[in-house]
Image: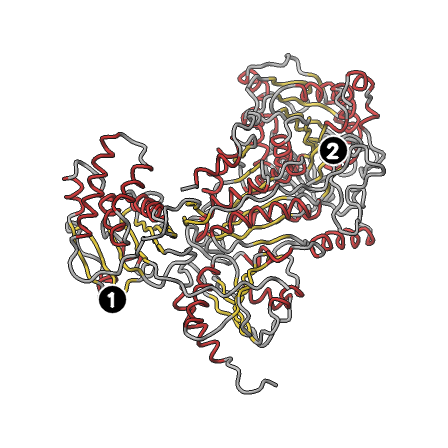
Amino acid sequence: MNDMTEAAKLTAADFKSDYKPVWCPGCGDFSVLGAITKALAIIGRPPHEVAVVSGIGCSSRIPAYTTCYGFHGVHGRALAAGAGLKAARPDMTVLVTGGDGDGFSIGGNHFMHACRRNMDLTYIVMDNHVYGMTKGQASPTTEPDWDNKLMPGGTGIRSFHPLVIALAAGANFVARGFSGDPNGTAELIAQAIRHPGFSFVEILSPCVTFRPEQRAWKEHIHTAAVPETDDPARAARRLMTDDGFNVGVLYAGSRTPYAKNPAASAALAELEQEFAL
Amino acid sequence: MPPISPQASTPSRSFSLAIAGSGGAGVMTAGTLLLDAAARAGLFGLMVRTSGPQIRGGEAGALIRISPQPVATLDDSFDALLAVDWQNLNRFGDEIPIGAGSLLIGDSDAGEAPEVFLQTGARLVSVPMKKAAKAAGGGWVNMIVLGLAGTLVGLPAQVLEDALRASWKRSAEALASNVAALQQGIAMAQGIEGARPQPLSVAGCGNGAGRWLISGNEAAGCGALRGGVRFVAAYPITPATELLEWMSPALTRLGGSLLQAEDELASINMIIGASYGGVPSLTATAGPGLALMAEALGLAVASEVPIVVVNVMRGGPSTGIPAKSEQSDLSFAVDGLPGDAPRLVLAPNSIADCLATTEWAVQLAETLQAPAILLSDQFMGQSRSVIDAPKQAPSPARRLVAEAHADGYLRYLDTPSGVSPMAIPGTPGVTYTADGLEHTERGIPSSQARDHIKQLDKRLRKLMQHDYGSRWADVEGDADLAVITFGSTTGAVREAIARAAAQGTALRMVSIRLLAPLKPEQLDRALQGVRQVLVVEQNHGGQLLRYLRSRCDLPGRASGLHRPGPLPLRPGELTRAFIDWAAAHARTGVTA
């Protein structure tokens, strides 16, 4: 079932389910879905050997839109569910997907610890700087002066920089993509999946409903002037001058991923002997 | 009709003794060795640990009861209290009840014994513990205490020495001086003049072959492994941590793994992810952690992913009393989730039962694709007991899984049993998305009324229709007055019922092991012919009483006997309460 001939035949369409997304017309997430399915075709493992795990939010609906094994859990805990799955089933390719609210606000603690743990997972965050599903509130990446109903005049809180946190917390691969460039983003995701350890890919994905001004993002996007690095100090310096629209691989490290399970070395009956008199 | 076991016979004589002192004085080591020696002498025993709130140091006590028969509860008072020193031991006044016939044994150089113990009329015997230890070539004071304690109980000197030698992990030189200290302690006990509590007779008790020495936390961990658990994610919390610390290396050796999570939100979602991946998974926690897990327990219900959550209950609410026992998470476990969320709730009722019931919890969760909450408690979890070696269960339960390329596969198919085949990631041709959103049979999110009712019915039906057999409760006796209880309180209730029977008051006992789902018809059968029930539990609000009233029609006017932790319910006070309650409900002539 997993021979080379079949793997070679896989296309993006093989990873796309027949279930119609709930997203608004023009949502950047359509392109991200396209990029993910393209990346999986590049990787070439059949859909049943891939799991897509998510939490709650517009972009967290992605698992069911693929033909892979999917897990759509609770808000903010996708990385935990994905880590458990990967720990129990290291043979699976595990993608964790979601939005900026799910990943950086309610799930912020898990984000930090997933980076530290460096399990061989790929975390794809579709960042639109807004809560879309609850109809337009500020997320951690929203600009502090963005006016909205819940926080009139803006939150007044400085925005969260996910790449800085990912790098500081120990992610082994850090990159940024843009939904307006699905082919380039597909390459980034494939590279992230192949890279051992925890790979984090932030994908700028406009919300045309609650942040229509984000349609202009395509004009701001530019590729990094310097190549990717395996030196965290250089990557950190680059982030200090980041305008938020720099796309490409920032950092690709060589930290050893979280250890796999060792083979069994004892039977339970032997372990139980410690209790016997 | 569940099999009705014969009423337990009157308990035979037991010996209760407390070893106490400042933390670091080795009282727990002495207690553990005493229990080990008693087991080697063919006796049963229980050792409960108690300590002050300090991280290190502070007062500590090993509360031990030894008997020729299995021991599931502490007695009403202690025959002896041995103190390495008396510092702050007055704080144990309530936990270590002393009678006029008891012995207080302390070091002659350790100052005054606390008034709370002296005022009982117990006799104080002072012996030169520290001096004797020094004289024995630098042996430890707690080995003097072990010699004293073992001899008071009636254990042969050779057995005490065997227990010490078997546990020794340091140099041969240090062993020699500690054996000498032990012998000094034995000689001191033999030299105590005047009346002393009657020691136990060990003649004909054998050598403990075929028995285990185990804590409730270890037993629960072992039961989980027998049930097939191979992945654990957890966050450290008192009093569940030892369960995890025992499982961690054991899982590694069995080819599984334990992952320390960043918090309980992560740990439960991790085990849901792992179990979704096909590996039976468990976490262990206590009240504060269980509260954090509520949302994901609902996810396990809705997405039909089997998991086991061992909740080692402690005093609550909030941080409460972390290192002391209470049965106050029952209401939360059976009812505390948003939405209509059928789940399994089980409670082991002894240390030995921690093994069997955790194993059963794994089997039920796997079979029924539902979360199971196991309500253990600090009393069982952190106490050690001598138990008969548990029988090997036939084979771990297997969940119903989907075949590769199964035709028209629907993950949440509305089957007659309510259980539908689960596709395990890696299986070709049956991929699906597990969802906490309400969904269709295929697993597609749906807010349609018909899908909601169909899936709600399915999830309830699979738990209600399952045949749980007779293990749902221990039903003992056939009297027309019944005491209902659960969990660790069962030990004291069982002993109190036996004592009441010896005084002419017959009572039936129903100890409920499967608390949810609770099938009213099963309880009706267990209470057939019963006129009145008394519900006994260790919490402030009478949670079991309220739960039973909400689910069943109890006979007569159900009343409750409940008290919060940390003090255990003792068999003596229960015996008096049972006799009074039975007298108030005595059959008067012909009932209408």
Q: Secondary structure at mark 1?
A: strand
Which residue appears at 73% of the width and 40% of the height? B422
Relative horizontal placement of residue A190, taking residue B265 as reference (left or right) = right
Which residue appears at 32% of the width and 46% of the height? B37
- Give the class, few, some or many, for how many residues have Cα within 10 Å of label 2's Cα (few <14, many ≥20): many
Q: Is residue B499 above or below residue A90?
A: below
Q: Amino acid at mark 2?
A: Tyr
Which disc is residue A69 wearing?
A: 2
Quick one: which residue is furthest to the front in this view?
B204
Nearest the eye: B250 or B198: B198
Instruction: Check chain identity for marks 2 and 1: say if they share one.
Output: no
Is the C terminus of chain B in the top left, top right, bottom left or bottom right quadrant? bottom right
| Residue tagged 1 | B100
- Give the class, few, some or many, for how many residues have Cα within 10 Å of label 1's Cα (few <14, many ≥20): few
Relative horizontal placement of residue A183, taking residue A154 as reference (left or right) = right
Residue B554, image x, y percentages: 61, 71
Nearest the eye: B295 or A157: B295
Q: Chain of mark 2?
A: A
Q: Amino acid at mark 1?
A: Ala
